Image (tube, helix red, strand yellow):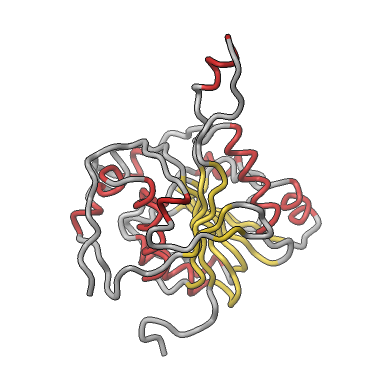
Amino acid sequence: MCSRPLQNPTRTLLSLTSASLAVTMTTTTASAPSYPTTPYTPRCTSWPYFPRDFVRSDESSDSDFYSAPRFVTHIDDNAISLLGKYYTQVLPRKGRVLDFCSSWISHYPKETEEAVDQGDLEVVGLGMNDAELRKNGILKGGRFLQDLNTTPSIPSEVGDLDAATCVVSIDYLTQPVSVLSSLRSRMRAGGKVHLVISNRCFPTKVVGRWLKVSEQERLRMVGDYLWFAGWRNVEVVELCDGKADGGGGGLTSWFAFRRNDPLWVVRGEHTGEKVNGEV
């Protein structure tokens, strides 16, 4: 048992550097993709969070909240481009992939679309809004409507999976370990889950602790989710630190103050090993 992670004062947009993560993790650089990658190291031998950490300021029905379709993107164009490049290198071209907490767009690259069109790959979507899922053309393997906060498990109908993705939505799950444990049970050995994280959110619907800690601690928190759900080889991949590129004078200098959306992926692998007393 370990002491509970300390909470920082409430703040929603906080910076993260690889150097700060190195306090408890050893930073390495992956050869492919070529993004700074930090292995996650478990900090606790037992679940370190309390039920109050997952209470939201708005506990009204999520089905009502998401009933109206939102045909918008929740990360900026730079983040979308980087995510597509990342997916190009990590998503399988054959088998079956689940995009959970999905919407009208999954941000998958053309290589994934081609694999779907050729019949080599099936992509399944699980989300909250029927109109959004129907508009997402890559979800040819099936579409499932489900509130993961009321039914925190991946339905067996999704089939056996080779990979899974979740874009800027893990912070909304009130029972993340149940969901991720269920996902692992659907995943073939060697399959990976990619949890994409930025700093945009609907603040009334994210779990309470998310808004009270730094971005560094949020990434560790998601690492904890995966670890206690039985995933292994957990890593934090930095796709964008959120800093604006460029500089100079005049109008160019003004635009330099407009920061890009930061973007990370916390990912884990189903290694096939028995964990947490599995038989």
Q: Residue at x 37, y 63 (%)?
A: 225
Q: Is residue 270 left or right of residue 49?
A: right
Q: Is residue 114 left or right of residue 75?
A: right
**In the image as oriented, which residue stretches furthest toward the right?**
118
From the viewer's perspective, is 151 left or right of 111? left
Where residue 179 appears, as percent x and y from the top left, is 40, 63
For the residue pair 176 and 120, the one nearer the viewer reads as 176
- Residue depicted at 54% across the width and 22% down the height: 256
Asked if 60 appears above or below 276 in the picture, the reply is above
Name which residue lies at 37% across and 38% down. 14
In the image, residue 134 sits, relative to residue 221, either above or below, namely: above
Q: How many marks?
A: 0
Of 234 and 189, which appears nearest the observer? Answer: 234
Quadrant of the image occupied by residue 135: top right
Q: Quadrant of the N terminus?
A: bottom left
The quadrant of the picture occupied by the C terminus is: bottom left
**Measured from the top left, where is residue 153 in percent x and y?**
40, 65
In the image, farthest residue toward the top: 250
The picture places residue 66, in percent across and down from the top left corner, at: 39, 39
Between 62 and 57, the one nearer to me in the picture: 57
Q: Residue furthest bottom?
A: 279
Quadrant in the rendering for residue 175: bottom left
Residue 113, horizontal then vertical, whole percent: 73, 49
Residue 1 position (above or below residue 240):
below
